[in-house]
Image (cartoon, rainbow, N blue to C red):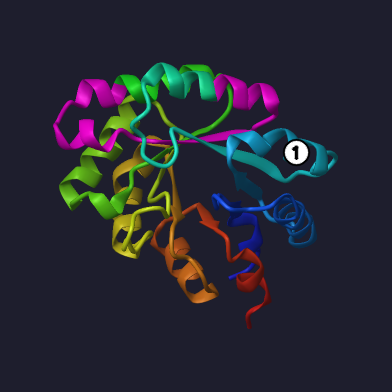
Amino acid sequence: MENINRHIEHTLLKQDAKYEDFIKLFEEAKKYNFLGVCINPLYVKLAKEYLSGTDVKIITVVGFPLGANKTEVKAYETKLAIEDGADEIDMVINVTALKNKDYGFVKLDIETVKDFCKDKPLKVILETDLLDKEEIKKACEICIEAKADFVKTSTGFVKGGVGAKAEDVELMYKTVSPYGLKVKASGGIRDKETAIKMLKAGAERLGTSSGVKIMESN
């Protein structure tokens, strides 16, 4: 598959990442012309500095990784991230509210963050490892109603979790694509074969910390 690099969000969300790890990430993003980098909010300004003059998008996360922050906190995180230079926001859905069938709260949570995104794309992380198929579909339907731009599989932080699965990506794609939303697959994408499988299942974006490995594999 050609231009796989233009689907990759080169990701570094590790708690123990060092300053030099971020610089390396930015340099790799420029070298391989990745679509974007995905980093924690504190490092958005650093990314903005190092990626100035490139077309590499700066993506950051909100309510990460549990999604259980108050809506007001998620909104304020979003506001600050955009002020710092973020191009896109990936927010974590409130999984507890979804499982409790408190769909109004889930929708309002997403809508509020979307309002603070202004013209910046919003991706909603569903955390598919914690959901059954009906819950995944329902979460996608709420994202459609809340006018999100993407649905995303995973944070990659669920202990023992698989992360992105092609069958889940396909379900998400079939649910949201008629309404113009796109799918980001993330979590466990560590080789080119898996990356291609996710794209064929309907993913538009790939969140992975193995972008270099994917690009350098035959």
> Where is residue 87 shown, x and y percent of the image?
64, 33
Visible residue check, residue 131: yes
**Is residue 46 depicted above or below 183 in this figure?**
above
* Type of amino acid under label 1: Leu
From the viewer's perspective, is 71 left or right of 10?
left
Residue range (magenta): 78-107
Around disc 1, counting alpha carbons within 10 Å, would you say few (fewer than 14), some (14 to 19), or many (20 or more)?
A: some
Badge count: 1
Residue 58: image quadrant is: top right
Residue for badge 1 = 46
Q: Quadrant of the C terminus?
A: bottom right
Identify which residue, 49 or 14, lies in the foreground: 14
What residue lies at 72% left-to-right and 46% top-to-bottom?
56
What residue lies at 17% left-to-right and 37% top-to-bottom?
99
**Is residue 195 depicted above or below 82 in this figure?**
below
> Where is residue 162 shown, x and y percent of the image?
34, 64
SS for dot 1 = helix
User: Residue placed farthest to the right in the image?
Assistant: 53
Judge whether residue 177 is colored magenta.
no
Identify which residue, 28 or 19, lies in the foreground: 19
What residue lies at 58% left-to-right and 53% top-to-bottom?
16
Q: Quadrant of the N terminus?
A: bottom right
Visible residue check, residue 117: no
What residue lies at 60% left-to-right and 71% top-to-bottom?
214
Residue 167: image quadrant is: bottom left
Judge whether residue 86 is colored magenta.
yes
